[in-house]
Image (cartoon, rainbow, N blue to C red):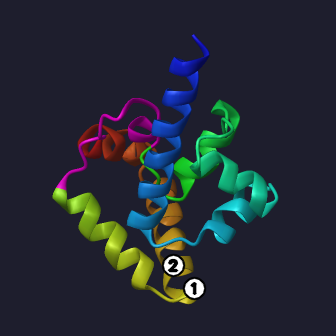
Amino acid sequence: MATTSTKKRKETGARLRKERERLGYSSRQIAQLLGVPMDVYERFENGEADPGIYRMPRLAACGFDVLYIITEERHLVIEEENELLMRFRELSQRGRTSIFTTLDALERLAPNIRRQWRKRFR
């Protein structure tokens, strides 16, 4: 039984590494994000340790496809989401702040806009 567990950890670690590389993060950046020492994070990617479910929300917030990491199934992202994400990442901090300010203003003007936004893009 331990062999299966070890095999699954290695597969999960490999997918974690693929996601990090796909998004262009260094392993040091993700270790800092998760609040773990570099050697601990390397153990996650090498399949020697399990990152655990409580670290997944932080990874998801950075764009990691957590479903893929855990199950090897991709969350199917629509093309517009990729375009928005790519353009958002290219913005300066001031540009990003402007986007969030605009979204906040729209939410105040139309209380149901968040619900409609989620229905349309999920």
Using the image, tell me which numbered label, if any, was put on residue 96: 2
Mark number displayed over residue 93: 1
User: Along the line of sight, which residue is nearer the eye, 61 or 109?
Assistant: 61
Q: Residues within 10 Å of mark 2 (few under 14, many from 20)?
A: some
In the rendered image, residue 36, in percent from the top left (x then y), is placed at 80, 55
User: Horizontal and vertical percent for residue 88?
Assistant: 40, 75
Identify which amino acid the numbered label 2 is placed on.
Answer: Arg
Residue occupying the point 20% across, 52% down = 78
> Which residue, as the protein is rendered here, is positioned at the far top?
1
Q: Is residue 69 above or below residue 102?
A: above
Which residue is drawn at the image coordinates 54% and 72% (left, top)? 101
The residue depicted at 43 percent of the width and 46 percent of the height is: 15
Q: Give how far apart the Cα atoms at labels 1 and 2 are.
A: 5 Å
Q: Is residue 109 visible?
A: no
* Residue 3 found in image quarter: top right
Task: Estimate how packed mark 1 is, as few (under 14), some (14 to 19) or many (20 or more) residues with alpha carbons within 10 Å.
Answer: few
* Quadrant of the rendering where the C terminus is positioned: top left
Tell me where residue 44 appears, x and y as whole percent: 64, 46
**Highlighted range, magenta:** 66-78
